[in-house]
Amino acid sequence: MANAPVTEKKDWATDQEVRWCPGCGDYSILTAMQLMMPELDVRRENTVFISGIGCAARFPYYMNTYGIHSIHGRAPAFATGLAMARPDLDVWVVGGDGDMLSIGGNHLIHALRRNVDVNILLFNNMIYGLTKGQYSPTSEVGKVTKSSPYGSIDQPFNAASLAIGAEASFVARTHDMDRKHMQEMFTRAHAHSGASLVEVYQNCNVFNDGQFDSISKRSVRDAMLINLTHGEPIRFGAENERGVTIDRTGAAVVVEVADVGEDALVVHDEAQPNPAVAFALSRLASSPNEPTPVGVFRAVERTEYAGAATNQLAAAQASKGPGDLHALLRSNPTWDVS
Amino acid sequence: MTDVVDAPLGREVDRVVIRFAGDSGDGMQLTGDRFTSASALFGNDLATLPEFPAEIRAPQGTLAGVSAFQVQISSEAVSTPGDEPTVLVAMNPAALKSDLGRLASGGTLIINEDAFDERNLEKAGYVDNPLEDGSLAGYTLITIPMSKLTREVCADLGVKARDAERSKNFFALGLVSWMYTRPTAPTLDWIDQKFAGRDAVIAANTAAFKAGHAYGETAELGSHVVSVPPATLEPGTYTSINGNTALSWGLIAASQQSGLPIFLGSYPITPASDILHELAKHKNFGVRTFQAEDEIAAVSSAIGAAYGGHLAVTTTSGPGVALKGEAIGLAVMLELPLVIVDIQRGGPSTGLPTKTEASDLLMAMYGRHGESPLPIVASYSPSQCFDAAIEAARIALVYKTPVMLLSDGYLANGSEPWRLPDVDSLPSIPVEFATEPNHVNDAGEDEFLPYKRDEKLSRPWAVPGTADLMHRVGGLEKAENTGNVSYDPANHARMTELRQERIAMIANDIPLTSVEGSEDARIAVVGWGSTWGAIRSAVRRLWADGIDVAHIHLTHLNPFPKDLGEVLARFDRVIVPELNMGQLVRLLRAEFLVDARPINKVMGQPFTAGELRMEILGHVNDLEA
């Protein structure tokens, strides 16, 4: 796909009126995507966005590429079929936390374990938006919504932990208030061969407004966002005064660098085959009210699924020759009647 | 292949029906299958009915664990596995108990007497040993210590007694092969190939087979020898085929005739899994098979592949179709080609996974929310599954629509001789991908309208990778032509009508109703699916008695042939035998206001020709009264 024609943001936008609520976090994600695309050496006609159902799932209508707005939860399965049939395409999957982690949880984990080359963007707003405000599989315990007037009693999923547990080869997190960081994560996901999951913390200003304010507002980011940078000790804070170590139980813990010394800090290694540390890092925050890691948790090389399937076809053709229907029909014992 | 048939020629008959029954672990399916193959190579026409429990290892020796294989071999054309077996091979008391009722009166019983010990008798619910209490007096009883004889003949080979006993089904096969003058070479060759590398198994099975074969001679069973001469079949090259294999090969043929690679998204389910197994073998044909995480992912992946320009297929049985319903509705909305194969089984719910039933017709027709019509094709015999698969794929690809292809457990596992088609004469399936814009807008610019229709009311198939035709499809209602999301009331009505109309129009492109039988017949028997063989036999028996009855068998269930209503109106009575509680009969009554009468059977078994003949005769008498 090299040498794609030069494009700009507007080439990636459709003429369709964007119908998210004014102020929705999805706008900034869309903008980040439309700004990033021209920077990748890709063609619009080789790009496909596939979504399920939900607010986030309207995304494909606004990208001037090929696209399928499919059914609730199944986008990773549609994408898997398309990516296997057409390994020449760039396939993106977009969905929300209800779509991907509730009704579609099964398809998400299987797409990740198979490592089919699709880029999965999970817009996590910790609420059901399109059905008007029920608790979601990422809503915190105690969340009061229309369907949980006495507070949710559901233990939420941690999307990054789930993905790492599902053998994902690429897991990252970003948020809708930092366009540059989103573009960086989307670019990394695109470059990765295999399934990549990017969790995007996204504000729903109608049903869950301000859910991420305590970590994503500009004024608190230094103190509350832990940027994961490959090869560097994990530090954060206005003065980089805090860091992350692994304790005796294997848990990642936030420490004052002055107390433990820089050598005690975890040096982030996104390419580490053993997922234990990445998993521990994903558990650092149980809700967006604590210091929360963003960036790439894990990026390891593993056999890509569609390529493996294509290789099997090529190997079968090399060993058996191209299919011969006449011979196939005679592959079991035959007899002649004259 | 050399062969010595050293049995006497015996009495010549034009057909026999043999039923092999034993415990699930006794290898009855394999025994029946080998006997069938030898008979096919010998030149008989035949039809088979494998029946086995859903459990992989059902409790040994029990009625629930009985596995049986029935085959009719004939010197004439046959289309059913036979109503009543004339020979029952029973390897244990449970098999005798469960299947004796099917045996024709005066039929021959071949019994492994070693299995009739106290424990097995008790498990089968026998108080007294039926071999000794005179209860089998109405049959020709041949009791043989098969286990013991097999152990003995294997002892010289150094095979352990326990292992040797597993070969007792080959003893039975050898004996029955001798009694019915089957050639032995195909079976001996097959043993060598099947168990290649396992010399002890080859030796034991070969020895048991030969011992069984020789036993007939030694025990002076010569008076039981029966020969069934080869049938006069149309000249050609034949192979023995079951429905699932024929269906798989038909899909491969459709792939070759359309020039599109197959993508199969499937999730294992009885009795459809063998299609996945078969297609997974043929990657050199460019077949991609994807064993998905569930039924929904299976159909969804196929729709994804269809969007990418592949011949997309998903295979399943009734429970899987239920799960796929929402995604099939999306395919209706997207107007993409997709073949959905439903190998029907007894329902509802898990029902009877290994038993046949044809009760998914109304689900195929209506089992989705909203108005979501799609074409339905049904296969009617094991070998015809090949043609039905090509036809389903043709309609899907030419009309850009999901198509339901209905088969059932009986067709899937039953086999028959198949005269191989000349692959060069198979119809080609024209497929066109859109390559350029199809519209000039008011500003004079070229644009692509993904829902602009052709004369077939099909929309263009523009696959990703095609420059300038980028477009988005989805489940929300489409505006006519542009395909943009539309909530306009008039547009929804228009699109609903168009979706209905474009499926109805397919009636112009399928064969007219074919009526078998006399023009003067007052009664038409209208069937679909696997009832074909039994209806055909029943009707022919009536013809032989001088009774005019017509047979109409529908391969296209939506839309119907365009002359069907007019044809049915010519008859005084329309009767509709179905392996369900009356599904086609409802469609016919609703569509044509015809007073069609049902004949229903839901016992997990196909109709027999005899029972259908009686039912039809009842209508004949009723009309004449």
Image (cartoon, grey):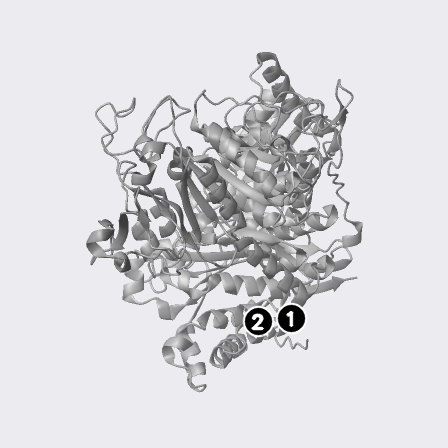
Q: Quadrant of the N terminus of chain B?
A: bottom right
Residue occupying the point 39% across, 48% down: A163
Q: Amino acid at mark 1?
A: Leu
Residue occupying the point 28% across, 65% down: B118
- Outermost residue, front direction? A239
Instruction: Where is residue B407? Give x, y as percent.
Output: 57, 43
* Above or below, B562 relative to A231: above
Instruction: Where is residue B248? Give x, y as percent.
Output: 62, 51
Instruction: Where is residue B564? Give x, y as percent.
Output: 69, 27
| Distance in Å between CA atoms under marks 2 and 1 | 10 Å
Relative to A4, is B315 on the left or the right? left
Of A308 and B333, nearer the camera is A308
Residue occupying the point 47% across, 51% down: B102
On the image, numbered disc 2 is attached to which residue? B178
Q: Amino acid at mark 2?
A: Trp
Of A152 and A297, nearer the camera is A297
Instruction: Where is residue B230? Give x, y as percent.
Output: 69, 62
* Above or below, B583 relative to B479: below
Of B597 and A37, nearer the camera is A37
On the image, numbered disc 1 is attached to which residue? B9
Q: Which mark is residue B184?
A: none
The answer to whether one can see residue B260 in this image is yes
